[in-house]
Image (spheres, rainbow, N blue to C red):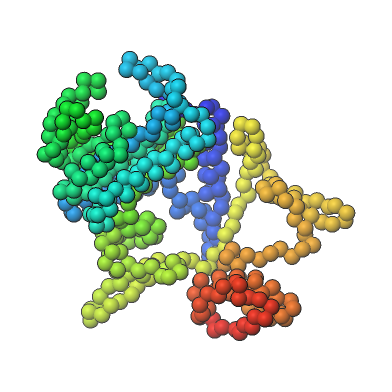
Amino acid sequence: MHYGLRRSEKDLALSKIDIQREFLETHGIERNGEFIPYGKYAKNAWYNTESYVAELQNRASSLVTYAAINNLTCLFLTLTLPSEYHPTKTLKNGKVIDNPKFIDDEYHTPKAGTKKLSRMWKRILDLRPLKDLARENRCYFRVTEPHKNGTPHLHVALHVPKESVERVLNSIFAIYSFPQIEISSQYIPDSYNNRFYDKDKKRTIYKRSASDKFGLTTLIKNPFKYLMKYILKTLDDLREDKNNFSNLSLWYIHHSVTRFHTSRTLIPLWIYRKINYISRFQNMLDATKDYVAGRIRVSATKRAIDLLSLDDNREIKEETIWEKWNDFTAVKRTRKFWKNTKKGWLRAYKIKHPDIIPLQIDNKKLKYNLTTHKLIDLSKKPVTIPSWLSTPVLKQHYQYLLTLADEQLNLVHFGITQNEMIKRGLLKMPLVSLNDYNDNFNFTTKELL
């Protein structure tokens, strides 16, 4: 299956993978004389896939277990886009033909279709029966997947209390009906207990009455297995060959489509990834319990994570379990040069400094940046961006600014630098608006921590 991809689009997606993989392996940080590539900590559907799949299973399992603990029932929804997003359609005899209703413009591309699906799902979440539920009584895991013609559709595992199932179903069917939505359920309400057999699709449908155009299609017995089936369908097995990409994976990369979304039921993923080296927090649900109870605390600057516990004297003990490094330098190794052609980004040749070409015009030394296509005047002092500086260099730069005379000091730059010092916890003072740094601004040296 090609999923609507042209050959040039597949080549472009493969080139994107090569560029990103090379960046992750050649760029990183240097700490204590050791080079640590960014790829050591990165993981996605095509990089460090075993770790990524294990994390996905952990997320799905934790969410389903959470739903079971809270006695929530699973509704499995499939949302399909309107006909104008589908370039082709399949007849009952299996023949594929062009869809005359398809609109071929930028507002009906697969990327635009995923945004449309998100709005359709948001409309469901805004329904009153779901709005009335407490946050802990509703959760979902959402998977985006393409049809054979490349048009995306959504699979959503929605968990709600059993007593709310009928009301939720009635509200959803009031705004969407077959074939735009199909719903399977772990529980069939009494009002949907009329069984009808669909000869075309060879399945049983549970309806309220024979005249209804909507109903439940399947009785779900194992929500976790049902969910994992759709999650694993979107992933390639790259264990033996890391370049064995299917057209399905290239579709996600080319259209920049995110495979999975979840409700904010569990601990935030960025926090979990920083603390799961501790065996106690390897299970996402266990980490969520500590996070909700307030035992996992994130600093205001998000540069440290603390764990609160009771010591032998029954007093609260605070232990830092993760802290952002300050003693490192961002570095990059010699990398390959890529150039843009009509066929996409292709590997060209190796060069030590591929981005910069030295020039001299009218006895003025310049450099031309191939990436930004800008001339750099070497006679001008480069601008220092405080947020890019490591903490030791930032301290040194701030002390240098304090030694400058008033007429030499750029007050706005000083304000940006001082605010960056405050954000990193290096100065004890509130953030100051840059509007306050005018010509009459008087400042005093603050005590460093």
Residue 334 image offset from top left, x and y in percent: 63, 49
Quadrant placement of the N terminus: top left
- Residue 85: name its quadrant: top left
In this view, the residue in front, 111 or 145, is: 111
Does any portion of residue 330 appear in the rendered image?
yes
Residue 201 lies in quadrant: top left
Q: Position of residue 430 (x, y in %)?
A: 50, 77
Q: Residue furthest right?
A: 362
Q: Position of residue 381 (x, y in %)?
A: 74, 65
- Residue 276, relative to residue 255: is it above or below? below
Q: Nearer the viewer, residue 311 or 87?
A: 87
Classify residue 306 by image quadrant.
Answer: bottom left
Q: Residue at x 48, y 29 (%)?
A: 103
Count of numbered labels shown in the rendering: 0
Q: Residue at x 71, y 80 (%)?
A: 406
Q: Residue at x 38, y 68 (%)?
A: 298
Task: Say left or right for 309 vs 187.
Answer: right
Question: Which residue occupies the foreground of this view, 48 or 260?
Answer: 260
Horizontal side of 408 relative to 248 (left or right) equals: right
Residue located at (71% from left, 63% from top):
382
Compare residues 381 and 42 and report the one nearer the observer. Answer: 381
Q: In the image, 86: left or right of 437?
A: left
Q: Is residue 56 visible?
A: no
Q: Position of residue 231 (x, y in %)?
A: 33, 40
